[in-house]
Image: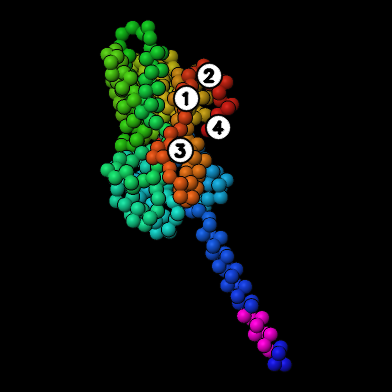
Amino acid sequence: MKRSRGSAAAMVVLVGLVMILAALGCQSDKKKGITLGFSQIGAESEWRTANTKSIEEAAKAAGIELKFSDAQQKQENQIKAIRSFIAQKVDVIAFSPVVETGWEPVLREAKAAKIPVILTDRAVDTQDDSLWVTLIGSDFVEEGRRAGRWLVEKMKGHEGPVNIVELQGTVGSAPAIDRKKGFEEILKDKPNFKIIRSQTGDFTRAKGKEVMEAFLKAEGKNINVLYAHNDDMAIGAIQAIEEAGLQPAKDIVIVSIDAVKGAFEAMKAGKLNVTVECSPLLGPQLMTAVKDLMAGKALPKRIVTEEGVFPMETAAQELPKRKY
Ligand code: GYE
């Protein structure tokens, strides 16, 4: 009797021990997993939705827990999302900043909490570069130059002025600032090329159409070229051009950036002249960077995506190969 009571007590202790060990094991398993907080800009374009998909799929494939937040193109929402990631103590924060300025306070909060921050797609304008680890994305100035170089070639032999209207991306965003800069850099010593009107279409089809309507109303047949900072705005503008009784890609040469499927379809239909590639498929590179960071590896300050230029003639051949 005595003995069996003793062994029952030992059993209880043993079971207790096993339970404690299991709980500890569970905790350390949890610790092993990486949590990434990602603040996305919104869903303003075909590019952006492809970018979101790439990040979600790559996180899954890498076994990284993703906390995803959509800011609906508002900086204040991105700041809120970053603060909530800090409160949740995620391992790494990544975000695609809608505009370049205004990030220092929240980035300092992340730094104080010792949470590393990776920028994807767009740059920030901060005095202190130690507030972020690396920027993964395209060289937007070079994309603007590529658009400009293609246009100069295309207009060779054109007599008289080349009047350009420009649909800019979101005001204050890195791609809008840089794509304008690169394009103007190529045209600055070509006096016959003139940007006669330039306005933002906020990277959306609806705004692209609306602003192009205004351009057409003001300038009519005076317009030789449309330079759109992304394909969605170009596609919206094509509608406006057709509704005004003009032929897109013939009466008005159209140059845009991104190289999303919609642009290849427009080129195949003979309505868009060229698109400069900007890849949204940043997910795999981001997950590699997150893992490297957690493994204590040093990352380069800049990770640049490789991209090309696709004129109309290549559309039929390229379209089936496009992944976004
Ligand atoms: O070109 C545009 C999107 O930041 C590169 O944002 C990105 C841009 C892209 O809305 O379509």
Q: Residue at x 49, y 18 (%)?
A: 312
Q: Which mark is residue 323?
A: 4
Q: Residue at x 38, y 9 (%)?
A: 156
Question: Which three-letter amino acid code belongs to the residue tagged 3?
Answer: Arg
Quick one: label 1 or label 4, which is nearer the N terminus?
1
Is residue 309 in view?
A: yes
Q: Which mark is residue 134?
A: none
The quadrant of the rendered image in which ligand 1 is seen is: top left
Q: Which residues are magenta?
A: 5-13
Question: Which three-letter amino acid code belongs to the residue tagged 1?
Answer: Gly
Residue 9 within the segment the image draws in magenta = yes
Quick one: label 2 or label 1, which is nearer the N terminus?
1
How far apart marks 1 and 4 lie (CA) works out to 14 Å
How far apart marks 3 and 4 lie (CA) works out to 14 Å
Q: Is mark 3 within 8 Å of ligand 1?
A: yes
Quick one: label 1 or label 3, which is nearer the N terminus?
3
The image quarter containing residue 8 is bottom right
Other residues around mark 1 within 10 Å, as few (<14) / some (14–19) / many (≥20): few
| Observer-nearest of 289 and 257 | 289
In the picture, which quadrant includes the N terminus?
A: bottom right
Residue identified by numbered label 3: 48
Q: Which mark is residue 308?
A: 1
Q: Say which of marks 3 and 4 sits in front.
A: 4
Residue 47 spot, x, y in % from top left? 46, 35
Residue identified by numbered label 2: 314
Q: Say which of marks 2 and 1 sits in front.
A: 1
Is residue 243 in view?
A: no
